[in-house]
Amino acid sequence: MKTLKLTTILMLLTFATGQMFSQNVDLGTEKEAVLKVMKTYKDALQNLTTEGTFELFTKDSEVFESGGVEGSYAHYIEHHLGPELGHFKKFEFSDYEIDAEVDLPYAFTTETYIYTIVLNPDDEGNSRTIKKKGVATSVLKKIDGKWKIIKTHSSSRNTK
């Protein structure tokens, strides 16, 4: 009888403190917040800008692209994507799909898409269009109540 009482008390105490300290997290809301971060980044690229994107990434983020280590997001923008955007007349995603999984404090996304880049005309007025099938995976972390991209990797190949 003593063991039963002790067991019951311990179970009630565990339940009460577990409820008191547990976080009431709506994973659906968290997933929507993650998807919003990824959409904001995609929309910026399609608008040929990096404005508003730096706060989507952590300062020590890591960017990997098609077999290359690009460094932090800031480095990637300064030495790679930023200068490229200036040569684009259009950057458009189509057949875009995204999957997100939240496992607090992290989230994991996989994006698949076709991207089309139309380059600005050269001195002779010739323009070129690049169309590729791409995939990107990203790891985000919730820091101070905001989702931030800490790692992202993208690669592409010619469309069939």
Image: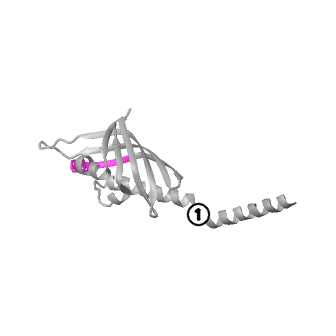
Name the residue at the front extreme. 2
Q: Nearer the viewer, residue 40 or 147?
A: 147
Which quadrant of the figure has residue 36?
bottom left
The percent coordinates of residue 108 (x first, y second) are 48, 48
- Left/right of residue 12 with respect to residue 94 in the rendered view: right
Name the residue at the right extreme. 1
Which residue is under mark 1? 23
Name the residue at the top extreme. 160
Instruction: Check the picture and name the quadrant holding the N terminus.
Output: bottom right
The percent coordinates of residue 122 (x first, y second) are 15, 43
Which element type, helix, strand or loop, lies under badge 1? loop
Instruction: Check the picture and name the quadrant holding the C terminus.
Output: top left
Q: Which amino acid does label 1 sit on?
A: Gln
Which quadrant of the figure has residue 66?
top left
The percent coordinates of residue 141 (x first, y second) are 45, 55
Q: Nearer the viewer, residue 35 or 90?
A: 35
**How many other residues sit within 10 Å of disc 1, few (<14), some (14-19) or many (≥20)?**
few
The percent coordinates of residue 50 (x first, y second) are 29, 56
Kindly identify the residue that appears in the image at 36 percent across and 35 percent down: 157
Asked if the stretch drawn in magenta spans residue 126, the answer is no
The number of callouts visible is 1
Q: What is the span of residues highlighted in magenta in the rendered image?
A: 81-93
